[in-house]
Image (cartoon, coloured by chain):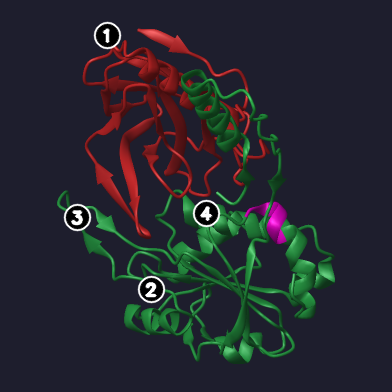
Amino acid sequence: MRRVTPAGPVRLLAVPTAVITGAVLLLTGCGSDSDGRAELSVRAAYIPQPVSDTMAAGFLTIVNKGGTQDELTSVTSTAAGSVTLHETVGSSMEEVTSLDVPAHGQLVFKSGGNHLMFEKLKSKPVQGGTVTVELHFAASDPVEVEMPVESATYNPKTGH
Amino acid sequence: MRKKTFAVAALLTAATLTLSACGSGDSGSSPVAVVSEDVKQQAATVLDQPFPKPDLVLTDTQGKSYDLRKETAGHPTLIYFGYTNCPDVCPLTMNNIAVAKKQLTQAEQDELRVVFVTTDPDRDTPAALGKWLKGIDPQVVGLTGKFATIQAAARTLGISVEAPHKDKNGKIVSTHGTQVVAFSPKTDGGYLLYGEDADVDDYTKDLPKILKGANP
């Protein structure tokens, strides 16, 4: 198992997208896409301090630098009775059983879109703390992530 | 995403140019100017035709009858439709408003009416609503009642909410509104709409204007 500890709040702006787009172009140009494994890393993980004592949302970005797609199949945490994957469809949340992590791409959880839903939390996550989760994939090894708890109004675009 | 970022486009354009330059050997073209513009657009949509305030009588968190038009007449008012079992957008929207509100003077805060109408009235009893809103801002008015009444009121503001239903795992799926409607204290008309990506800074900037019924 790999342990990923995001170093503080990660500011995800357009630059990483540009870099990734650049990389895709480059690889397409070379025509070499022979890497047969997903190479996963996690960034921009956070949990906004919830209002409820027992329920929270969590967000992160899973980056796949490899040439093969993978699938996030479940998330577990000792801090919560259940962690489920949700997609936002219109203005409803729909639970899904898995989400794709595309080759040379990323799976993004962000407010108003995909989110992790923590239920039956053993204690209320408080700003400044962390919640540890384990991400499970169809092919890759599980990845442990320490998700920092940010303010209730945290906006990853501005970093506060 | 409201921030227009041209960096990506610029980079892509540059890459394309480079590639085509290799093929054609056209050395006459100069590189395009890299535009680094980062314009944050106005969060509010100003309505040409304001919405009348819904004629809505529901139950507040004290279990008392609350007549929306009567209680909020002449007050700057924000209305949002959501539910407390919502982990993401509903608490974020309400907290964004609450944090921005705390930056007003106490008198201004007392003048403002922030109304949270549940879209999940079976689970959001007055007590449940009251407990949740206390964790956000005790001044927020929480309203519950018959779903049909709530849905009809939302519809008059162009907000569509569906009745809670169970998914295939037996979990209740509710819907929240996608917009916050701001009503002018001068006309009582709903003249501004805020989408889900309006953040604390947007509300902080706009609330003083809304208090006067002015456009942000």
Tag 1 and tag 2, C-beta contact below 8 Å: no
Q: Is residue A159 above or below residue B81?
A: above
Using the image, tell me which numbered label, if any, was put on residue A21: none
- Residue position for label 3: B167
Tag 2 and tag 3, C-beta contact below 8 Å: no
Q: Give whichever of discs 4 and 3 has the lower sequence position.
A: 4
- Residue position for label 4: B91
Q: Distance between the residues labelled 1 and 2?
A: 48 Å
What hue represents chain B?
Answer: green
Tag 1 and tag 3, C-beta contact below 8 Å: no
Q: Which x, y percent locates residue A70?
A: 26, 22
Q: What stretch is highlighted in magenta?
A: B199-203
Instruction: Determine the secondary structure under disc 1.
Output: loop
- Residue position for label 2: B160
Front disc: 1 or 3: 1
Instruction: Determine the secondary structure under disc 2.
Output: loop
Q: Distance between the residues labelled 4 and 3?
A: 22 Å
Q: Which x, y percent locates residue A39?
A: 36, 13
- Residue position for label 1: A34
Residue B163 sits in which quadrant? Answer: bottom left
Instruction: Determine the secondary structure under disc 3.
Output: loop
Q: Give whichever of discs 2 and 4 has the lower sequence position.
A: 4
